[in-house]
Image: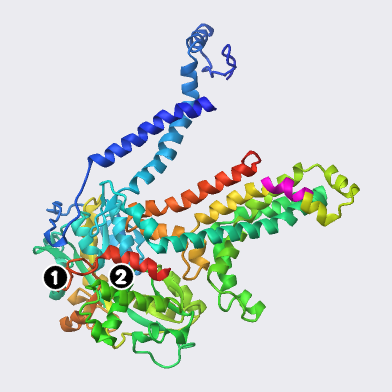
Amino acid sequence: MKRMLHSLRTPAALLAAGVLLAACASSGGGGDVSKRKVPDVPMAKSVGKGEGSLNIIVWAGYAEKDWVRPFQQQTGCTVNVKVGNTSDQMVSLMKSGQYDGVSASGDATLRLIYGGDVAPVNTKLVPNYATISSFLKDGDWNSVNGQMYGIPHGWGANLLMWDPRTVKGSLNSWGAVFDKASAYDGKVTAYDSPIYIADAALYLMRTQPDLKIKDPYSLTAKQLDAAVSLLKDQNKHVSEYWADYTKEVQAFESGTSVVGTTWQVIANTINSGAKTKVKTVLPKEGATGWSDTWMISAQAKHPNCMYKWMNYIVSPKANAQVAEYFGEAPSQTKACDQTSDPKFCDTYHALDAKYAAQIHYWTTPQQQCVDGSGNNCTNYSEWVTKWQEVKG
Amino acid sequence: MGDQVARGQGVTVPAPAGLEPSRRGAISAFFAPKRRIRLTLLLGPPMVWLVVVYLGAIVALLVSAFWSVDSFTENVVHQFSTANLHTVVTEPIYRTVAVRTILVAVAVTAIDAVIAFPMAFYMSVVASPRMRRFLVVAVLTPLWASYLVKAYAWRTLFAPNGPMSWATGGHTPGYGLTATVVTLAYMWLPYMVIPVYAGFDRLPRSLFEASADLGGNAWRTVRSVVVPLLFPAIAAGSIFTFSLTLGDYIAVGIVGGKTQLIANVISDQVTLNQPLAAAVSLIPLTAIVLYLAAMRRTGALENV
């Protein structure tokens, strides 16, 4: 046995040395985002026959069988769906190279583009792109130097949800989960991602003007600390954090949580069940939100199926189905004629560029302030550390 | 197979059936003086598996703790730096969570030891052979059920309007650290009961009589005879309960409310900053190595 161990030592040491050498040989750079170059990833020139299969990462509710099945019948592409819980998880899954595409929010898109994980999209190959709302095209979150890196899907705001069995009256302020959270001690919930710090920053932007917060994603160290201390106070009253949307559904149904941030699709899921009925509101302080973009992986094994999917999911009928199911504004202008509720697009202000501009869309915080106010902002990795501190 | 026994070593070389006897002789003649070849063939594949897959993965993990990530794109940057280790040592959050995790592991181990001791005593010393078989099966059966099923069962029990709340008139701890400790103690109990049961089985019954003859009552016998002799068995069981608790992040996510343990921190970091996650994972790794070293001194490792 001793001899065996002895003979093991050499190969193990060799292996370790090899790995170390490999580590030293290659190197990469970090540096300033504004001076970054986008990796050169080739763009598709044409769309051929489907490869028979498609692997996509989606937000919960974006790929339900009502509209996936017709797509499979039309194209022969079998759709395999992986639900991502947070933008961070989606970025990490895309880096694995095992997926063809993703429905990325604005806090994931640029990371994917500059990381070389997604390919530019040839919008000429996506016929339904022409009638997409113009205020979603060539945005600074989905394009670089006039080149689109995806197809806009839809947008919406994070909402405040409560259970009227416990929470009396009608809420209209995020204060319910911050300053007044003690009223629901041990029953408050919050989104388990560093990006939720922006929700606290937005609340402070309205309630503490002397902090001079202009944009919830452009925070100086002092402003970040103020948001973190608000979140630490909130933590005392939190029952559970949620990232998996089914966890929030279950928490509200069982009464574990009674008030907190949500997506409309979660409220719809709870209200379609028998256990409880919840209410939602877009509070008076405004809200953070998302603008999602379908992106194709730089390593897509089924690029033709992915192009067919990007065109299908923004077709008037399918885009209307997704938007109504999830509870968000569709990106396709013609989707408004296809919704089962004729007033749906009015309710969600789908065609109202001014309304859309008021939502504070998820974006990745950088040292070079994303609102252009300077270069003394905190970057996302600082947010990540702070978020772990909040959870304690 | 095995009709040719190689001389000198007693190692069986399987000879393909249907070969001419003379050729078989040639094969064994080829291998007989070449002990190294035979040893290589025998141990090669498992060694490759152990070194490349197992040790290789751990080495790669340790090495990656010295890399960093691009703060914007999260791509791993292969440049040597001790920044991650520095972060792990200096950021108070990692210390807080590490201490909490170790306390949970100690609590789970203590609860399991206290429950397992009388159970194993009854199973081994008091119960009839029939009853003993039944009890062993009963202890082992929960291991066949899915981990998630058991964790979600406890989530139901601890729910605000669940059975626990109903039975105690609303005085439940709810989701949190207590629920986590209870759930993990339940999960790992069989890993403690079985080694302690085996320890009792090895205990000569004559020692009980000897203790009684010398005037020791039941309590004195347990304290001065049984516990010292069983300590290595309890220590062996505690290695399982302690190390399994250090690595768990699923149960705490289901019944722990807003609590996080060290494995939650690692799993949260893996998607964002894999090198930092690797550096954080050195904390439980160190804790387990230290614990094993301590247990080795008790003689527990010879007892498993």
- Quarter that holds the N terminus of chain B: top right
Q: Which residue is outermost to the top? A: B22
Q: Are marks 1 and 2 on the same chain?
A: yes
Numbered tag placed on residue A195 in the rendering: 2
Q: Which kind of residue does numbered mark 2 sit on?
A: Ile
Mark 1 sits on what residue? A137
**Could you tell me residue A184's position as x and y percent?**
46, 84
Q: Residue at x 42, y 72 (%)?
A: A241
Marks 1 and 2, how far apart in space? 24 Å
Q: Nearer the viewer, residue B302 or B125?
A: B302
Assign a secondary structure to mark 1: loop
Does the magenta run of residues contain A291? no
Up/down of B204 relative to A391, above or below: above
Tell me whether circle 1 and circle 2 mark residues in contact (CB < 8 Å): no
Q: Which residues are magenta?
A: B225-232
**Could you tell me residue B55's position as x and y percent?**
43, 38
* Disc number lying in front (1 or 2): 2
Assign a secondary structure to mark 2: helix
Q: Main secondary structure of the magenta part?
A: helix
Quadrant of the rendered image containing residue A385 = bottom left
